[in-house]
Amino acid sequence: MMLRAEFTTEPFEGEGDPPAHALAARDCLLAAGLDPDFGPLGTAISGDREQLLPALAEVLDKALAAGANRITLQVTAEDDRV
């Protein structure tokens, strides 16, 4: 099953370089072999369930460890059987 996830990490720090917690989240996805769409207001990623779910668990852990105080996550199943 394919999944699509979108998430934001907070606190937002305004203009300039992305905060450490956002970079840590992005780097987890890259390390898992995924290709995130990383932007100033959030990150989107699609992938196979078996690959994406463990990567998202790592994202939560690493982002919190890097200073995030809130992570908003939405996951949508993209059922290809329709």
Image (cartoon, grey):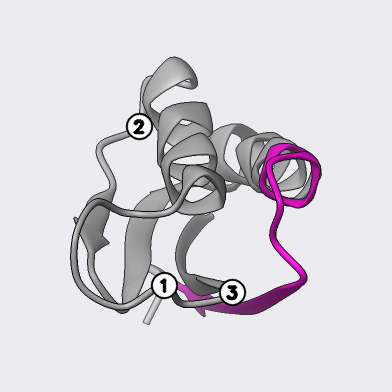
List x then y, in percent, for residue 6.
Answer: 45, 73
* Between marks 3 and 2 in the image, the one whose residue lies nearer the viewer: 3
Quadrant assignment, res 10:
bottom right
Work out how far the residue at label 1 is from the one at label 2, CA to CA, in angstroms.
25 Å
Q: Which mark is residue 13?
A: 1
Q: Which mark is residue 10?
A: 3
Mark 3: which secondary structure?
strand
Asked if marks 3 and 2 touch (Cβ < 8 Å), the reply is no
In this picture, residue 30 sits left or right of residue 17: right
Work out how far the residue at label 3 is from the one at label 1, CA to CA, in angstroms.
8 Å
The residue at which mark 2 appears reads as 34
In this picture, residue 30 sits left or right of residue 3: left
Quadrant assignment, res 65:
top right
Mark 2: which secondary structure?
loop
Report the quarter where the C terminus lies: bottom left
Q: Is-magenta flag for residue 49?
A: no
Tell me which amino acid carries mark 1. Answer: Glu
